[in-house]
Image (cartoon, rainbow, N blue to C red):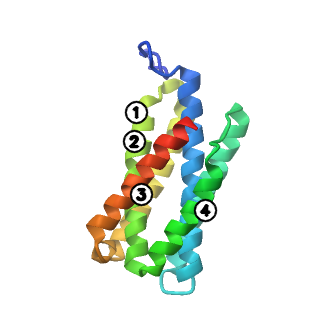
Amino acid sequence: MTAKTAENRIPGDLTREQLLARILRVDQAGELGAVRIYQGQRAILGKGRHGPILEKMAGQEQHHLDTFTRLIGERGTRPTILAPIWHVAGFALGAGTALLGERAAMACTVAVEEAIDEHYAAQYAALGDDEAELKATIEEFRQEELEHRDIGLANEAEKAPAYPLLSTAIKGGCKLAIWLSERF
């Protein structure tokens, strides 16, 4: 017997359609934010020693965004109404952390990717076998996000000024953005 998405829901839980719409909406929003973070970082650090690393990660994030944008269109899901905010906030976060230095930019990457890892893992667990293709996409992207986290750690993210504070603030902001984008 194969598990189906939302088959064990109880009163008050999202329907299958609501859950899938929420997943696609928030993932597209998150990838938009990620693309803009890397654009902000590249605007400040693009020609430095981290330029090629940032370019590679930005390219992967753009692929993620393009994929979720396509899926939203194919499935007739509305995107988040908060996209204009994430467009500006993502760039500001990327540029702002880059202005604090290369380690702070890498700390931003680590914090964001740790929040996204948790988010994607929960989505993967919530999807049934009837959504095998979407599950595979989420897992593939999750692995790339973990690669980005590892790159940040390898590039001294934890040596950024006030790393615990910076990391906690960014993760908190990501979790709030996830919650809002799922709903709006």
Q: Nearer the viewer, residue 129 or 63?
A: 63
Q: Earlier in the sequence, mark 4 or mark 3?
A: 4
Residue underneath mark 2:
121
Q: Earlier in the sequence, mark 3 or mark 1?
A: 3
- CA gap between label 4 and label 3 equals 19 Å
Asked whether disc 1 touches disc 4, contact meaning CB atoms under 8 Å apart, the reply is no
Q: Earlier in the sequence, mark 1 or mark 4?
A: 4
Q: Residue at x 57, y 86 (%)?
A: 47
Q: Residue at x 55, y 45 (%)?
A: 27
Q: Is residue 163 above or below residue 127?
A: below
Q: Secondary structure at mark 4?
A: helix
Q: Nearer the viewer, mark 4 or mark 3?
A: 4
- CA gap between label 1 and label 4 equals 31 Å
Q: Amino acid at mark 2?
A: Ala
Q: Is residue 114 left or right of residue 142?
A: left
Quadrant in the rendering for residue 88: bottom right
Residue underneath mark 3:
113
- CA gap between label 3 and label 1 equals 18 Å
Numbered tag placed on residue 99 in the rendering: none
- CA gap between label 2 and label 4 equals 27 Å
Q: Amino acid at mark 3?
A: Glu
Q: Residue at x 60, y 65 (%)?
A: 59
Q: Secondary structure at mark 2?
A: helix
Residue underneath mark 1:
125
The C terminus - image quarter: top right
Q: Is residue 62 above or below residue 82?
A: below
Residue underneath mark 4:
88
Quadrant in the rendering for residue 181: top right
Q: Secondary structure at mark 3?
A: helix
